[in-house]
Image (spheres, rainbow, N blue to C red):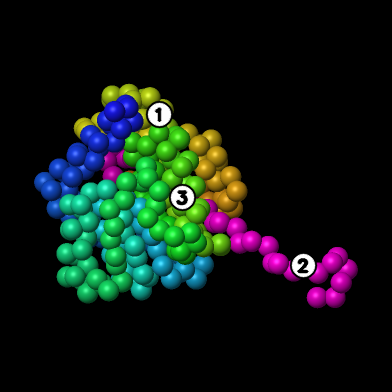
Amino acid sequence: MTDEEELAAAQRAHWQATYAAHPGMYGELPSAPAVHAAEVFRAAGAADVLELGAGHGRDALYFARLGFTVRATDFSTTGLEQLRRAARDQGTAGRVTTGIQDVREPLALPDASVDAVFAHMLLCMALSTREVHALVDEVRRVLRPGGTFVYTVRHTGDAHYGTGIAHGDDIHEHGGFAVHFFPRHLVDALAEGWRLDEVHAFEEGELPRRLWRVTQTLPAPPSPYEPPRGAAR
């Protein structure tokens, strides 16, 4: 087993145990990035949303309450079971489906099958730079042309960057949780071939954590027929 695989297995076990010990650990209110993303998705005319790293579902359920059809994925079976129970309790089960997904593997969706993708602090988990690039390539694959991707990551201006257990590749571990702290050039590299709409700095939680909220759009293909220059339109 490689170092990456060992770290991935340890993180999966840690999240499973954390969700089991602290059901609904993030509460029922949506995150601020999810509130923003819902506004962006609605303005873009999106109907269906894929959430990566949905956990116990506070953001996925918020999207569903707003009327979006939601595919919520996570690698924690415990978190997703909590999400399904909450969806039944809130009457949104008909708009929410769940799926086990390790984002180191290809996304279990067809090409061009969703309007929008949301990921709150999923890309800055214990994923190598290579794995992050592969994941964003998968997001591109499953998005429809013109689709929007909103994600958040902790960055190298965060107080925890450079401290704790170092795993290399800007990944540092605190309290059992490994975080990949993003430099700005990685955000720009992930947006190559996209329209980068926004990189918004914000703070959340204790310390506080310092994050970027990134919004990028997959360009629609050009019209199959473009009149010659000077021709009447």
The amino acid sitting under disc 1 is Asp
Point out the frontmost of discs 3 and 1. Answer: 3
The front one of 187 and 78 is 78
The front one of 118 and 198 is 118
Q: Image check: 122 left or right of 77?
A: right
Magenta segment includes 210: yes
Q: Secondary structure at mark 2?
A: loop
Does the magenta stretch mainly form a helix, a strand or a loop?
loop
Q: Image check: 191 left or right of 47?
A: right
Q: Would you say the residues marked 3 and 1 are in contact, meaning their CB atoms lie under 8 Å apart? A: no
Say which residue appears at 84% left-offset and 67% top-offset. Answer: 228
The amino acid sitting under disc 3 is Glu
Single out the residue that lies furthest toward the left. 21
Q: Which numbered tag is attached to residue 170?
A: 1
* Circle nearer the N terminus (2, 1): 1
Magenta region = 205-233
Quarter of the image where the N terminus is located: top left
Q: Which numbered tag is attached to residue 138?
A: 3
